[in-house]
Image (cartoon, coloured by chain):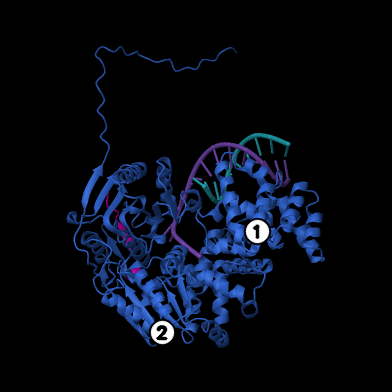
Chain colours: A blue, B purple, C cyan
Amino acid sequence: MAGAGTSEGGDGLNQAQRAAVETGASHNLVLAGAGTGKTTTIVARIRHLIKGGAAPDRILALTFTRRAAAEIRSRVQDPARASSPVPAMTFHAWAMREVRTSPDVFGYDGWSVIDADDQLQVMRGVLGRGKRVEGLKAAQIIGVLSFARNTRRTLADAIAAKHPDAEIDAKVLGEAVRAYEARKRERRYLDYDDVLAVCAARLKDPAVAAWVGGHYDEILIDEMQDTNPLQWAIIDPLVTHTRFYCVGDDAQSIYGFRGADFASIHSFGERVPGARVLRLEDNYRSTQEILDLSNWLLEQSPLHYGKHLRAVRGSGAKPELHSFETPQDEAGWITGELLRARDDGLPWSTHLILVRTNYSGRAIEARLVENDIPYVFFGGTKLLESRHVRDVLSALRVIANPDDEVAWMRLLTLVPRVGDVTAARAFDAVLAARADGASARDARAGALAALPGWLRAGLDAIEEAAGQVDDAVGRAAAMLQPVLAHKYRNENWDARARDLAHVERLAATRGSITEFIEEFLLSPVFASELTAEPKDGDHVIVSTVHSAKGLERDWAFCAGVSAGAYPSARSLGDVNELEEERRVLYVALTRARDRLAVTRTVAHTPVRAWVGTGASAGFVEDAYFLGTLPELLVRETVHVPGRAPRPAPPPGLAVPAEVDLSVDLGEL
DNA sequence: CGAAAGAGGGTTTTT
DNA sequence: CCCTCTTTCG
């Protein structure tokens, strides 16, 4: 529990925390450094409001990741009193809930939410054969567009920010973007940014803002430093209609890529008139040695965070720095430490393993599976992102929304001997029949006549079961079972089939296909949550640093802190990106309570780089964050497996002058 | 000629 | 693992 362990008062809060919890100002910003009890304070504030008479459903806690939302929900829930749960959810989930609950206010009734993969398909569709515009691939265009929308800048500005070196004609790119927007509208798709944008646009109407704001006594926002301009556009109009209680730390801003500007938290007072700013500065989480290393990292920055964490708990063991030859050795050593700790009687929940990328997490995941160590991987592959689940859901989607082109194309190309061309023809036939007024079922009967009968029969069966979503999922999985078993025959089909059974179970309580898919999209379930131990069982946590904010454990292993990774090579040349990388590492280091083990591969050679552009550019002798690490701050161990010296050959070995290298031709 | 299968190359971070 | 390009198959 963050922030526990102080002597003042029976509620476990220190003086600064209590002041923050009981503040009477209408708007508040709590600036809280790592480990100072940020989540504790939010949770205590919510309890305080409820104790003061607020109805739980008049309080709203907004977060940026679904993990953080789950954390708040579970900690607010008082086991003693079965009060109705306080809504804690991501910005996106809340925005969508508002839109869905009040279609007469927001519109967009019957539109489908699409995720990044679907966006990509739509963009590819409008790009046509070349699949590129101005040298940018579909994914890059989506990226620029999303950056523009989240930062509320023009496309041209976003291009300049994201691709400063490329010569891109914004006009030409703009046409591709317009085509993408038109296609989305035509198919009634809302992408993630649309969900926020719809909300922001409608809240501009003061009557709508008053009405929405009137639903809440107080809106709490976790990790305020990650708020981007699009999200501010939702907050701003509500400021006069409800109270805001925001908690954040500029040193932990790591969502710049999504448009967050960590400096915006400094102007909170001007943006939100009458806001009181409170500070939490005592770290209750870590030992001083862990904070010394973290403080040192931040002090190397040209930016002035003005942070110096002080450990209330006092002194402990020095952080460890372990160097290995390969990532496999690294993963093997971490696994070995976990097993050793288990033998010493420590529970699996002692440990947190932090990785920079999903990709690098997989190597560790594999070793955990190998050793039967129960774990949950936050930020790992989401169930919905796996291909087999998308395959099955495509069958549900065409029932829920017969115009869902992406789903139709995916479903149809699953049929043997059907590729893009045949599928597109069939989809056009569906559209044409529907335009003539045919029912969805009749449209399918005509358009799919030339395709195998199981597809039509299967879709009809799914439609009949549409009210029972788990039944519908089961029918879709059954219909596709033969083709999927073939498609994934060399790719772990058995495990994938089990996933599909999980999806069926998840669907059990949902009211409609649309509701289920939307819930699944906006609050994704991680694959490992289902395949690993049950949620409440004792387990190790593997997490990307981005998903780990707010998490803490007795031991933390920060893996892959190698030269070329911190900072990553692609961030060199941009001070802002470089500093965000620094903050990522800072977040990682500050997760540990007692033992911090930083691991890395290969011997360090200095990474020299130019940082910045124009007059502000400077040459950095060693960009690697740990390149200049003072020896005193860590205990370093180099794990290079000693190569066993080869014994000398026995004396007098006969060496042939030549070896016969020709192949035996056999009988010709 | 379109579709399927196989080989090779490359990966940020989240909703 | 995921996407793309190339080769092979029907």
Left or right, A577 with respect to A195, comes to: left
Q: Is residue A188 above or below residue A117?
A: below
Q: Where are the magenta residues, as a range?
A: A603-615
Q: Position of residue A514 (x, y in %)?
A: 64, 64
Residue extending farthest left: A632
Residue A277 sits inside the magenta stretch: no
For the N terminus of chain A, which image quadrant? bottom left
The local crowd at label 2, few if under 14, some if 14 to 19, many if 20 or more residues have their Cα within 10 Å, is some
Q: Chain of mark 1?
A: A
For the C terminus of chain A, which image quadrant? top right
Label for residue A577?
none
Residue A7 in view, yes or no: yes
- Which amino acid lies under the numbered mark 1 shown in the image of this protein? Val
Residue A612 sits inside the magenta stretch: yes
Front residue of A607/A308: it is A308
- The residue carrying mark 2 is A272
Q: Is residue A321 above or below residue A139?
A: above
Question: Circle 1 sits in a helix, a strand or a loop, which is it?
Answer: helix
Q: Is residue A245 above or below residue A533?
A: below
Question: Circle 2 sits in a helix, a strand or a loop, which is it?
Answer: loop
C-alpha distance separating marks 1 and 2: 44 Å
The local crowd at label 1, few if under 14, some if 14 to 19, many if 20 or more residues have their Cα within 10 Å, is many
Residue ID at (66%, 45%): A481
Q: Position of residue A177 (x, y in %)?
A: 59, 67
Which secondary structure dominates the residues rendered in magenta?
loop
Label for residue A469?
1
Residue A515 location, quadrant:
bottom right
Residue ID at (33%, 43%): A339
Residue A166 in view, yes or no: no
